[in-house]
Amino acid sequence: MEKLVVITGASSGIGAAIAKLMVEKGHPVLLLSRRVDEMEKLGLKNSLCKSVDVCDLGAVKTAIEEAEKAYGKVDLLVNSAGVMLLDNPYEQDFAEWEQMIDVNIKGILTGTNIVLKDMVKRNEGTIINISSIAGRKTFDTHSVYCGTKFAVHAITESMRKEVSASNVRFIVISPGVVETPLLSHTSNDNIKSNYNEWKKTIEGGLDASKIAECVSFAYHQPQGVCIREIVIAKTKQAD
């Protein structure tokens, strides 16, 4: 059996696609999300599904410790959990800003805090953070969302540099539009409608399996090779 992979946001979209592919590649997986029923519906062998809030350090730690007892040390952590709440900054509730900051930023830090020290000690391991093109450039109605994804980029690159001598890899994957339930979190119906109309002009978003393939490609390189960032989008997506 291959080494243990931990995936947050694993109940749907990109996280679920990554979980499926990693199991196909022979890895045991720990799936983390609030919706344990959706993770269990995936029916993945050699998997453990735990309902956790990714911002809850204690809950994430308990789940990881249980998985490590069953499958060995975490070799890959994929931080895929995220929320996208689009709105005009002069109209958006503070609670939506706070939710994006909590999930999109704190949510990549809990698992990292738990596994990184041991990875450095072992001189092996990989952490992949799923960010966005919105972590590289700004878009209208995306202001705080962009801010959280810029933070993901900065944290990933800074940590990569600081642990590089220990042979631990940090990688950021930056997708454009992907066909996931992410947009459904947005409460502004007009913005959702306009977004969906725009998507038609690029013939829809990427399939989540394409992001999973990027994760697998980067991870399965030799440990001495770090593909620091992958940016992927539909060819017709100009921005």
Image (cartoon, rainbow, N blue to C red):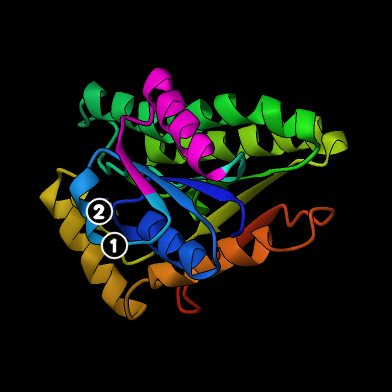
* Callout 1–callout 2 Cβ contact below 8 Å: yes
Amino acid residing under circle 1: Gly
Name the residue rendered at 46%, 78% in the picture: 236
Q: Tell me where residue 235 appears, x and y as whole percent.
A: 50, 78
In this rendered view, identify the residue nearer to me: 76 or 69.
69
Residue 28 appears in the figure:
yes
Few, some or many residues within 10 Å of mark 2 (<14, 14–19, 20+): some
Which residue was labeled with disc 1?
43
Q: Tell me where residue 141 appears, x and y as whole percent.
A: 32, 44
Residue 133 relative to residue 83: left or right: right
Which residue was labeled with disc 2?
40
Name the residue rendered at 22%, 70% in the picture: 197
In this rendered view, identify the residue nearer to me: 110 or 27.
27
| Magenta span dominant secondary structure | helix
User: Is residue 101 inside the magenta stretch?
Assistant: no
The magenta-colored residue range is 48-71
Name the residue rendered at 25%, 30% in the picture: 96
The image shows residue 200, relative to residue 7, as above or below, that is below
Residue 19 relative to residue 120: left or right: left
